[in-house]
């Protein structure tokens, strides 16, 4: 009985585990979006840039999204200008570029900072094992990816140069989707 009481008390005073659902972000059009809107989905979060050697990854990321969106995958793109000013444009310019050049249909968000003293709180969560409980994954460059499970928790981080078509990435996404 004593151990049940101690367990109950520890659960009540322990901080709740954070998930991406605890964050609100602005979409590319400036509207507030609660990431809890994606509950039950497998989420691939990507920091993107329009003038980067990795920018052609938009094509494969969009194809991945199209292939798996009806199975529960959503991709969330977060433009960032943290690396050699490779995303200098406004949200409107970014949206136009992504739509015209790569026919992006996955949700895009307003430009944020993904590292440094002005890092967005979502990225503090994604990149810190202390926050996410899984992995320390400081952003190394544009197109670093985070795979999030249906429970809203980080599964893994994927290196910027690694394609979403890499067999290990596909395997991880399909496992998270349960297919």
Image: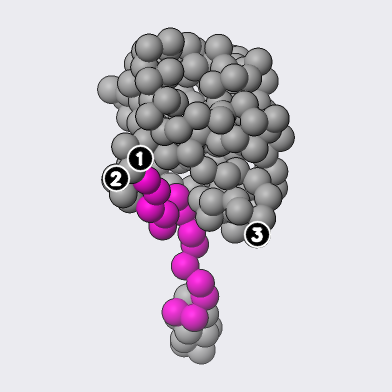
Asked if the residue at tag 3 contacts the one at tag 2, i.e. Cβ–Cβ closer than 8 Å, the answer is: no
| Residue 109 versus residue 121 in the image, above or below | above
Q: Residue at x 51, y 72 (%)?
A: 15
**Image-quadrant location for residue 114:** top right
| Residue 72 versus residue 115 in the image, above or below | above
Percent across and percent down for residue 155 are: 55, 40
Q: Residue at x 52, y 85 (%)?
A: 6
Q: Nearer the viewer, mark 2 or mark 3?
A: 2
- Name the secondary structure under disc 1: loop
Percent across and percent down for residue 2 are: 51, 89
Magenta residue check for 10: no
| Residue 31 versus residue 125 in the image, above or below | above
**Image-quadrant location for residue 162:** top right
Q: Residues within 10 Å of mark 2 (few under 14, many from 20)?
A: few
Q: Residues within 10 Å of mark 1 (few under 14, many from 20)?
A: some
Q: Residue at x 32, y 37 (%)?
A: 29
- Per the model, the C-alpha gap separating discs 1 and 2 is 5 Å
- Name the secondary structure under disc 3: helix
Asked if the residue at tag 3 contacts the one at tag 1, i.e. Cβ–Cβ closer than 8 Å, the answer is: no
- Per the model, the C-alpha gap separating discs 1 and 3 is 27 Å
Q: Which mark is residue 27?
A: 1
Give the residue number, with chain letter if any, for mark 2.
31
Give the residue number, with chain letter if any, for mark 3.
130
């Amino acid at each position: 009985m004593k151990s049940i009481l101690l367990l109950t008390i520890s659960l009540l005073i322990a901080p709740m585990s954070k998930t991406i659902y605890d964050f609100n972000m602005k979409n590319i059009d400036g509207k507030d979006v609660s990431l809890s809107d994606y509950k039950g989905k497998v989420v691939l979060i990507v920091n993107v840039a329009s003038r980067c050697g990795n920018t052609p990854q938009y094509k494969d990321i969009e194809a991945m999204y199209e292939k798996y969106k009806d199975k529960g995958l959503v991709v969330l793109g977060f433009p960032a200008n943290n690396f050699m000013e490779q995303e200098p444009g406004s949200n409107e310019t970014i949206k136009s570029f992504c739509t015209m050049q790569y026919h992006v249909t996955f949700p895009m968000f307003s430009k944020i900072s993904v590292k440094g003293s002005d890092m967005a709180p979502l990225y503090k969560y994604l990149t810190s094992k202390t926050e996410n409980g899984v992995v320390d994954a400081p952003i190394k460059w544009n197109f670093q990816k985070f795979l999030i499970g249906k429970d809203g928790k980080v599964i893994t981080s994927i290196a910027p140069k690694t394609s979403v078509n890499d067999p290990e990435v596909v395997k991880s996404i399909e496992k998270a989707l349960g297919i």
